[in-house]
Image (spheres, coloured by chain):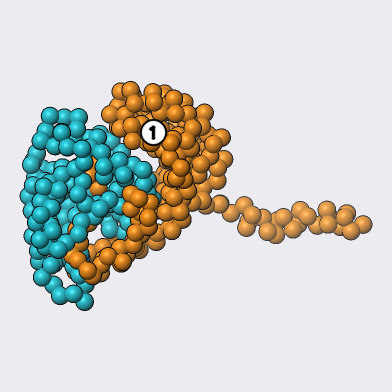
Amino acid sequence: MKVWAVSLCAPALALAIGPALSAPRAASPLVRYRDLKLPPVYENFDQGWQDRAALEFEIVNRADLASLRAGLRDGNPFVRAMAARALGFRADRASADVLAELAGKDPEYHVRIRAVEALGFLKMKPEVVALAKRDPDPGVQWTARTIEGLFVSDIDHAGQARAAYAQGIRREEMGSARVGGKAPDFTARLVTGEPFRLRDVVGSKPLAIYFAAFDG
Amino acid sequence: MHQQAQLRLKRDELDKLGAAAYVVVSMDVHRTRVFKEENLLLSRGPGPFAKEKSLVFATALSDPAGRAAALYGASRKCLRWGSWVENRPTWFVIDRKGIITYCAQPTFATPTSYVADVDLVLEALGRAARTATP
């Protein structure tokens, strides 16, 4: 009888809470990356970077693996590239075959770069990375040449990257460095792997800090 | 890389100022080490730095998520210059009180503009060196 009563009441209950249940859910971060107003194309270099950076943190930190794996097959090359990047950092070994396919065959060089990079983080498919050193695009060649050392490294580079993303960043902090203002503190790693903190070196000497594009 | 190579040529001036230089690379530690210790880029051309093993005098810092770059407004995460570019190259000078006293974005306007860029950084370091220790 109790079961019957609950069954009878269920439609009414659903009607009562239906609007809340059917309210539009926030789109996944990968979908929002696809829908960026200012996607990462040449002419947007100096604009919209805050949205791109914020979403990248969200994707690496929180996007579910199923959507990331599906993202490798997305029609938008920027989504494929971002999915590959995140899956590399997330050490998703199940994506290795698709990443290898993208590394060798994706028509967009920046997707191939991300796929090669991800395979390095996964420490899988070294033969694909070796082949990428002969890719027609110099950026892919460069990535393959520089990433191959990860295959023989004992360091968990993907784990270090995840730890860096896990710090998160608030929108209001972005671009907060201003001439005349206090230098924002940050952490990083020396090439020896030791942690570095800016505030530990401020005070003893004047400092010059250069943010490199990719090659300096 | 030309900015770093030029700074390396001027390291004596940097030392005289008692200053320290850092270069932030928004990549993993391994590739930051390659950047610091191996001259992969300029060794491929005929330029003046082609024979050098390492061009980077500054202490290299790995910033794999680009968090530091985003704090400093250098993050871009965008296509540019025929490749994927994490950051707009940007110089900052910080005095002993921790105040940012100089900021500049290289324009790459001429093939040798990096010479003037680094001279301006050294001038800014000279001014910062004259500020009192907190």
Observer-nearest of A84 and B40: B40
Q: Is residue A207 above or below residue A126?
A: below
For image coordinates 25% across by 67% down, the residue present is A202
For image coordinates 72% across by 55% down, the residue present is A14
Observer-nearest of A143 and B82: A143
Mark 1 element type: helix
Disc 1 chain ID? A
Task: Determine crowd level at label 1: few under 14, some 14-19, many 20+ residues with C-alpha closer than 10 A.
Answer: many
For image coordinates 56% across by 35% down, the residue present is A94
Residue that carries the numbered disc 1 in the rendered image: A148
> Could you say where residue A100 lies in the image, as x and y percent from the top left?
46, 28
> Could you say where residue A150 lies in the image, as x and y percent from the top left?
41, 38
> Could you say where residue A190 lies in the image, as x and y percent from the top left?
33, 53
For image coordinates 27% across by 50% down, the residue present is B60
**Chain with colour orange in the figure:** A
Taking the image as shown, residue A94 lies to the left or right of residue A30, namely right
**Chain with colour cyan in the figure:** B
